[in-house]
Image: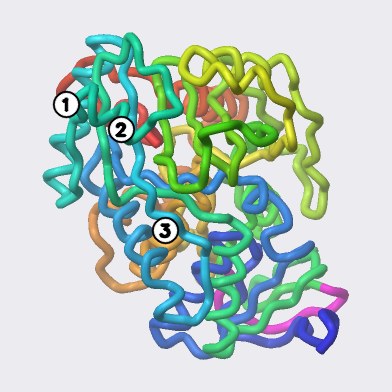
Amino acid sequence: MTREAAVAEVRDAEVTIIGGGAVGCAVAYVLARAGYRDIQVLEQGELAGATSGQAAGLVGQVRASKERCRLAMASVAEYSQIEQRTGFTADWRQTGSVRIALTARRAAEFQVLAEVARSAGLEVEFLTAARLAELCPMLDTTGVAAALWCPTDGYLQPNSLVMAYAGAARARGVTFATHTTVTGLRITGGSVSGVVAGGRCVATDMVINAAGPWAGAVARLAGLHLPVVPVRHEYFVTQAVAGWHAGLPVLRIPDVRLYARAEGDGILCGGWEPDGLSLDPREVTIGQPLAVSPDWDVLSGFARDLARFAPAVTQTGVREVFRGFPAFSPDGRFIVGPVPALRGFVMAAACNAHGVSGSAGLAEHVLESLQPDPSPYVQSLSPARYHPRTWDWDTARAQAERIYENYYSLPPSSRGGADASPCAPD
């Protein structure tokens, strides 16, 4: 069967999901599994062809709140079982992860994070120097103040995950129309009644906006203004480095704003820039390419900082650079759930760089948001907090950049302030 023959046409559907990345495909799969029988996914390019395909694939469960821990734990549970459940693999590697502290303040933060993790039922432990050296023989761990180990963390291949969701969704009757740009929404009596896409206007009862950095532009088609801010993120992968292999733990070194893992026999290294670079959401249009050239000053800075622990990172060539514009919100929370002002319009956006890693849990939140009595946490993610608009665009954009910049920042205090940066830690 040719690729063209396998792609569905735009059609009338009970549920239309806009966006064929990790979140859109996860929502399609979760809704179909929950009993929704008439779902289509519309994607302007290829599945996983934009932001999701540029993700590093790290999946960490240690978070600053119990709710975020549990969301990540739900995602890990899905990734661990998805091949057995569906026959499709996400190339999930449960290597564990090590979070390294270089200062006493960071070590104190780790103690708070460990308490939160344990309260959520997540297994974590602090490593001795000998155990850290055993788990991470490729690192120089001189000067490490503390190391927090989560054995059930890991990483996956984002493209594989998206294809697994899509394959499992197709098996439940979901159709996918790729290379199909949405250009309009039909609104009747305060409710979504149709979608204009691929040169056709088709009927639908519900639109789920999972368009990633284009989600704000999709919302504007409905006359809605939501602060979905695309912020640049990038990382690199080196050529082969002796001692690195796919079974090594994922590393997070928040004091130098870095994460790293093995990518085959190379090193994948990325981080969080101190000066975030965002796009003006008002100028992002549907179908607009969001390409960005590698910023070698930033990337070489990541390499220099990692070289303190893994000198080989600056002694080998770069094999590939990945970059994109994941969408952030001004308060660091997802924007998930129905928009009160427009029946049938549902958001699944502003994932704050957790779109791939948290896609399974986030999709469950979308499903829960459609029920009569969602939990207080899911209610707190509602787009209702941004509508009607009492905020201004410049401030919202600056706040979203700060969420990115402070991804690994220490909270104001070692206890009680760990949720000050809702995104972090990853």
Relative placement, left or right, of 343 versus 7 is left
Q: Which callout, 3 or 1, points at the residue further toward the start of the chain?
A: 1
Relative placement, left or right, of 285 versus 370 is right
**At 58% from the left edge and 56% from the top edge, which residue is drawn?**
158
- What's the amino acid at mark 2? Glu
- Residue 20 position, x and y percent, is 65, 65
Q: Is residue 387 visible?
A: no
Rendering quarter of residue 16: bottom right
**At 27% from the left edge and 42% from the top edge, which residue is drawn?**
150
- What's the amino acid at mark 1? Gln
Q: Which callout, 2 or 3, points at the residue further toward the start of the chain?
A: 2
- Residue 102 position, x and y percent, is 33, 13
Q: Residue 73: within the magenta?
A: no
The residue that disc 1 covers is 111
Q: What SS does tag 2 mark?
A: helix
The residue that disc 2 covers is 134
The one of 353 and 131 positioned closer to us in this rendering: 131
- What's the amino acid at mark 3? Leu
Q: Is residue 267 visible?
A: yes
Quadrant in which the N terminus is drawn: bottom right
Task: Please say if 20 is above or below 395.
Answer: below
Tell us which disc is closer to us: 2 or 1: 2
The rendered magenta stretch, by its main secondary structure, is classed as: strand
The residue that disc 3 covers is 362
Quadrant in which the C terminus is drawn: top left
Q: What SS does tag 1 mark?
A: helix
Bounds of the magenta segment: 198-207
- Residue 280 position, x and y percent, is 70, 32
The one of 344 and 311 positioned closer to us in this rendering: 311
The one of 235 and 388 positioned closer to us in this rendering: 235
User: Callout 2: few (<14), some (14-19), or many (20+) C-alpha neighbours within 10 Å?
Assistant: few
